[in-house]
C-alpha cells in the first residue's frame, strides 16, 4: 500500500487512563465511528444497551460461559456500527464494546 503513504498516518493515537470503579464499558472503534459520533453519544448508547440487557452493575453477565461473547456488548457494537453507517460515515467502521463491570476470575 505504498501509494497510500501520503494519506495514511501509521502512528496510532494512544491514551493511558486509569480505571475508576464507576467505569461501565470500553469502546474500541475505528475512525468511521468517531468521525460521525461524539464520545458522549457512543457512551450513552453503549450504556443503555448494557443496562437494557439486565446489567445492574453487579458484574454478572448473561453470557453462557467463559470466553462467550456478551450479548449486550454485541448488541451495543452492532448498534453503534449501524448508526455510523446511517450517518453516512465515509471511513471504515469497526466497533468492539467491552463490559468492564463483568467479574473476571
Image: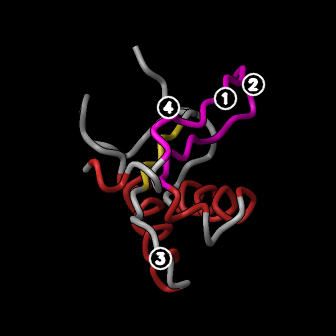
Question: Label 3 vs label 1: CA separation?
Answer: 25 Å
Residue 20, x across and y down, in percent: 75, 25
Tell me if residue 51 comes above or below residue 69 in the rendering: below
Q: Which mark is residue 90?
A: 3
Foreground residue among 63 and 93: 93
Element type where label 3 sits in the image: loop
Near mark 1 (Cα within 10 A), the count class, few <14, some 14-19 or many ≥20, is few
Label whose residue precedes the other's in the sequence (3 or 4): 3
Q: Which element type, helix, strand or loop, lies under badge 1?
A: loop
Across and down, in percent, residue 101 comes to: 57, 33
The scheme the figure's colours follow is: secondary structure
Quick one: 83 or 56, which is closer to the camera? 83
The kind of secondary structure element at disc 4 is loop
Q: Contact (CB < 8 A) between labels 3 and 4? A: no
First reached walking from the N terminus: tag 3 or tag 2:
2
Q: Which mark is residue 5?
A: none
Query: How far across and how far down the image is residue 25, in percent?
Result: 59, 42
Identify the residue shown where x is 39% and y is 57%.
94
- Residue under circle 4? 102
Residue under pointer 1 = 15
Q: Of circles 3 and 4, which is in front?
A: 3
Left or right? Give the position of 38 relative to 80.
right
Q: Which residue is drawn at 60% across and 30% down?
A: 14
**Separation of residues labelled 2 and 1 (CA atoms):** 15 Å
The residue indicated by pointer 2 is 20
Amino acid at each position: 500500500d505504498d501509494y497510500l503513504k501520503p494519506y495514511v498516518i501509521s502512528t496510532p493515537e494512544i491514551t493511558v487512563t486509569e480505571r475508576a470503579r464507576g467505569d461501565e464499558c470500553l469502546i474500541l472503534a475505528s475512525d468511521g465511528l468517531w468521525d460521525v459520533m461524539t464520545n458522549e453519544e457512543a457512551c450513552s448508547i453503549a450504556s443503555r444497551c448494557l443496562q437494557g440487557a439486565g446489567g445492574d452493575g453487579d458484574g454478572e453477565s448473561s453470557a453462557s460461559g467463559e470466553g462467550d461473547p456478551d450479548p449486550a456488548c454485541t448488541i451495543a457494537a452492532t448498534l453503534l456500527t449501524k448508526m455510523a453507517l446511517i450517518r453516512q460515515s465515509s471511513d471504515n467502521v469497526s466497533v468492539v464494546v467491552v463490559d468492564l463491570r463483568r467479574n473476571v476470575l
